[in-house]
Image (tube, rainbow, N blue to C red):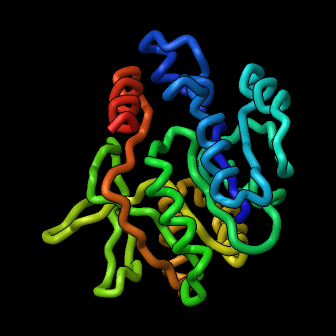
Amino acid sequence: MNYAIIAAGEGSRLAQEGVAKPKPLVDLQGEPMIGRLINIMLRCNAESISIIVNEHMTEVREYLESLELPVPLNLVVKTTPSSMHSFWHLSRVIPEGKFCLTTVDTIFREEDFKGYIDAFEADEAYDGMWAVTPFVDDEKPLWVDVNEHMGITAFKDKPWDGAKYVSGGVYAMTDKAFTVLDHCIEQGISRMRNFQRALVEEGFSLKAYSIDKIVDVDHADDISTAEAFLAG
C-alpha cells in the first residue's frame, strides 16, 4: 500500500494559542504527530510514503529528511492555497495503484486504521474507500450519505434527518482518481470536499468504512483530547 500525508497547513490556530511547535511535530504519546503517522503506515504494509509540507516548515522538512525509512519517502516542499492543491502536487509523486491519503492532524487508533486498510486492500469492487465516523469532531464536518450497502451516494455540508456519518479525513483510492483531480484543478475548484463530490458525479464507486471515533487536532485543547483518546 502506498500512503500520502498532507502536512502543508500553517498551523496558525495552534500557534495563536501558544503551541510553539509546528503542528506535525506536536507530540502525541511521546512521538511527533507526523512520526506516529509514518510509523503506523510502516506497520500497515507501506510500500512508499509521500508527504507535502509548506516552504515555511523548515523544522518539519529537516525532521523528515533526517529519517531513515525502509521504503521510499517522496517529500514535496510547496506552499499551496488549499488541501486539494496539496493533494494535486502529491499526485505527481504517488506511485501507480492503490494508495491512502490523510491529513497530518487526523487522529485514529492504529487498530482501527489497520482494519480499514486491510478492507481496502482486499476490496475489488470499489474505486475508493472513505473512512467515515459517527463521531462529529470537526468544526465544519462533511456529511456522508450512504445506501444500505455503505456505498457513498453524496457528500453534504449540512446534516439531514437520519444523517449518521461524517468524513474522517482519510481517503483510500486508486490512481484513477487523479483524472478527476486534474479536472477539478483546471476548473478552479479548491476544496477537498468538492473533489469528493466530483468523484461521485463522475460515477466513481466509493464505499464508506465506519470507524467509531476519529478526532482532529486544530486547537491547543485538542492535543490533550487526542492523548486521552489514544490512551483509551
Please provide percent x and percent y for residue 227: 40, 29
| Above/below status of 98 relative to 223 | below
Query: Residue 26's spot in the image, x, y percent?
Result: 55, 23
Query: Residue 179, position in %: x, y?
Result: 72, 75
For the image shown, how many numbered marks are present on the structure?
0
In terms of image quadrants, where is residue 221? top left
Q: Is residue 105 left or right of residue 46?
A: left
* Residue 10 visible, this angle: no
- The structure residue drawn at horizontal position 80% and vertical position 37%, both measured from the top left corner, is 77
Question: Which quadrant does the N terminus fall into?
Answer: bottom right
Q: Nearer the viewer, residue 97 or 10?
A: 97
For the point 42% across and 40% down, the residue is 216
User: Residue 28: x, y in percent?
Assistant: 50, 28
Q: Check the picture and name the quadrant holding the C terminus.
A: top left
Q: Residue furthest left?
A: 161
128 w.r.t. 203: above or below: above
